[in-house]
Amino acid sequence: MTTLTPTRDRAVDLVRALCIAGVVVLHSLMVGVTIGPEGPVFANAGEAGTWLVPVSWLLQVMPLFFVIGGFSGVTALRAARRRGESGADFAAARVRRLLLPAVAAVGSAGVLLVLLGDAGVDPEIIGIAGHRFGQPLWFLGVFLLCQTLLPVLVRLHERAPLRTVTALVCLALLVDAVRAVTGTAGIGFLNLVFVWLAMQQLGFLLADGWIDRLSRATRLCAAGASLGLLAASFAFGFHSPDLIANINPPTTALILVAVVHTCAFSLLRGRLAVAASRPLPARFTRFVTARAMTIYLWHMPVLLTLAGISALVGMSTGAPLPAPASPEWWLTRPLWLVVALTATALLSVPLARLESFRTRSFTVTGGAATAAASIGIAGVALLLLVGTSPTTAVVAVTAWLLALLVTSPVRAAVAARAEQPASAQPKYSA
């Protein structure tokens, strides 16, 4: 397989930055707040009308993000190998980079929920805020899984690239089929593994130039066939035409979207690289790339704060808040988006220091990296299944700190010393 040089790919970086921005825009549009007879009402604006279906076709960028994540991940892993680092070292570094900003975000959310309770805010509203905050955290758990398994899956890819991605796609199809036949929605959550890992493998193929070497006609046909299969699955009721609904739980519709996005990216890659080299896109890309996880983790607290401020202004002034999806509501969305994006960007500037924090290189065992990732995923699962509250925030943060300790330089140094023969360890005298 062809190995890329460790230089950054401008087109890849630009698309990743656009994906992050797309997620913030989509979630911003889904925030709905009105004033009812008993006070503020917070709801998912996507449930008002059918507007989310066409918008989801434009802003469902998670499949492309995981493909790009696979591209970047395999490139970074190969660069780490050339520096003499192991797959466990790579996985541990990724775990630390993901969990450190998460500790700050979830810890802060727990404190804010306590303060809201002390201020006398309705417990139901606090519960809604905790639920909305925790919803996007599924990404953290899945990305932890993908990054931890990346060294193993890269080895499989290097031995049998097409068989590996095909096996994952077939497993995802099997899960969808069993779910459809049995009517048991819970089975679909197995695709949190198979669907997203399949997209990561697609990113490996992109990184190796396999997709770019296909003829233009082949890539166009692959994209067209995927769109046709999507349309057929919608028509026969196998998948929902709402691509946001296909995330919870994930379905193979997202894999088809990933194929369309990947083919489009490959076809437009040259133009995207040219666009990415221009001053404004280049500044945008650098800004988001340096704080991507911070923006993702903190955009929902920003949106919830803006919704709370809107409710307070509405109640104090008596000014009505437009119902979601109404003409008046859509007229206010441009201003809402500008405020939400600006506030998120400003907040990410100081907080991104955690994301950019680097520890010196050290060696960890594969077991330590796996344990840290497992602890991290368990913390995310707790917040998703139970909801974010002061108690669950404390438990999750404690778990993540433990995961960080497992992969810390101190822990690695102690383990390395324990493996030395007794004669090689330093002796001390009184």
Image (cartoon, helix red, strand yellow):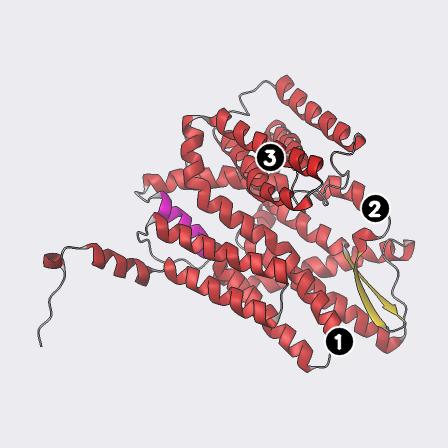
Seen in the picture, residue 240 relative to 99 is either above or below; the reply is: above
In the image, what residue occupies the spot 64% across and 73% down? 113
Residue type (three-letter) at the residue carrying disc 3: Ala
- Asked if the residue at tag 1 contacts the one at tag 3, i.e. Cβ–Cβ closer than 8 Å, the answer is no
Q: Secondary structure at mark 1?
A: loop
Residue type (three-letter) at the residue carrying disc 1: Asp
| Alpha-carbon span between mark 1 and mark 2 | 31 Å
Q: Secondary structure at mark 3?
A: helix
In the image, what residue occupies the spot 81% across and 52% down? 47
Residue type (three-letter) at the residue carrying disc 2: Trp
Residue named by callout 2: 51
| Alpha-carbon span between mark 2 and mark 3 | 28 Å
Question: Looking at the image, is mark 1 or mark 2 nearer the viewer?
Answer: 1
Task: Point out the residue furthest to the front here.
Answer: 182
Q: What kind of secondary structure does the magenta stretch mostly adopt?
A: helix
Q: Quadrant of the C terminus?
A: bottom left
Q: Position of residue 236 (x, y in %)?
A: 79, 30
Q: Secondary structure at mark 2?
A: loop
| Alpha-carbon span between mark 3 and mark 1 | 42 Å
Seen in the picture, residue 380 relative to 390 is either above or below; the reply is: above
- Place residue 294 in its image quadrant: bottom right
Q: Position of residue 68 (x, y in %)?
A: 55, 39
Front residue of 72/60: it is: 60
Residue named by callout 1: 122
Earlier residue among tags 3 and 1 = 1
Question: Looking at the image, is mark 3 or mark 1 nearer the viewer?
Answer: 3
Number of the label disc, if any, that sits on residue 172: 3
Front residue of 134/375: it is: 375
In the image, what residue occupies the spot 51% across and 54% down? 377
Q: Which residues are magenta?
A: 87-96
In the image: residue 5, left or right of residue 24: left
Q: Alpha-carbon neighbours of circle 2 within 10 Å: few (<14), some, or many (≥20)?
A: few
